Image (cartoon, rainbow, N blue to C red):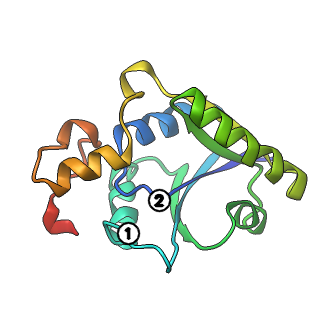
Amino acid sequence: MNKVAIFPGSFDPFTIGHENVIIRALDLFDHIIVAVGYNSNKADFFPVQKRMQWINDVFFDEPRVTVAKYEGLTVEYAKEINATHILRGIRTSADFEYERAIAQVNKAMTGIDSVFLLTTPEHTPINSSIVRDIIKHGGDASQFVPSRIKISIADK
C-alpha cells in the first residue's frame, strides 16, 4: 500500500519552512499532495493559482510532490483522494496543542492519522503571516521563501 500524505494549508505565501517539511517528509511517504485550501468567504493575499504555481515551481523536479486545490474539511478531502495520512508542521507548543485536537477529531471521523514534523530550529520563527507582512510593506522577504519563488507586491 502506498503511503500518501496531504499537506494542507493556505500557503499564502509558501515559505522555506513549508519546503523543509515536505523535503523531510519525502523519506516517510511515497507521495505528498500539497493541498492548497480555498475558502471563498476568506480574502486571500495572493491568488490560489499563483500559490499553486509557486509550489509547482519549487518541486518541478520531484514527481512525488503534486499540488491541488480543495474546499471544505481537510479530512473529507483526504478521504476523497484516498490519502493515508495528513502531514502537519509544528513550530511551537501552541501549534501542537491546536493540531493535536484537530488530528484526534479527524482520526475519529475517518480513521486517517496525522503525522507531525517539528520544524528545524532555523525555520521556527518563519510563518506565512510574517512573510506576508514583510511583502505588504515593501520589504525583501526572499530569505524566507524558496529560492525558486520570486515574490513581490505586484503578484497580489
Do the CB atoms of the residues marked 1 and 2 lie less than 8 Å apart?
A: yes
The amino acid beneath tag 2 is Ser
For residue 114, above or below residue 60: above
Mark number displayed over residue 44: 1
Q: Which residue is mark 2?
A: 10
Left or right side of 6 for 125: left
- SS of the residue under disc 2: loop
Position above or below: 9 against 92: below
- Of all residues, the one furthest to the bottom in this rendering is 40
Answer with left or right where residue 119 lies relative to residue 102: left
The quadrant of the picture occupied by the C terminus is bottom left
State whether residue 42 appears in this view: yes
Whole-percent x and y of residue 95? 58, 36
Quick one: SS at disc 1?
A: loop
Of the numbered discs 1 and 2, the one sitting upstream in the chain is 2
Residue 18, percent from left and from top: 44, 42
Residue closest to the eye, 76 or 96: 96
Crowding near the residue tagged with mark 2, few <14, some 14–19, many ≥20 C-alpha atoms within 10 Å: some
Residue 147, located in which quarter of the rendered image? Answer: top left
Residue drawn at the location 34% of the way across and 72% of the way down: 47
- Tell me which amino acid carries mark 1: Asp
The residues tagged by marks 1 and 2 sit, at their Cα atoms, a distance apart of 8 Å
89 or 134, which lies in front? 134
Location of residue 53 in the rendering, given as x and y in whole percent from the top left corner: 35, 64
Indicate the position of residue 70 as horizontal and vertical percent values.
58, 71
Side of 83 where 26 appears, left or right? left
Task: Indicate the quadrant where residue 52 lies.
Answer: bottom left
148 and 60: which is toward the camera: 148
Q: Is 113 situated left or right of 92 in this image?
A: right
Q: Nearer the viewer, mark 1 or mark 2?
A: 1
Q: Give the label on residue 94, or none.
A: none
Q: Residues within 10 Å of mark 1 (few under 14, many from 20)?
A: some
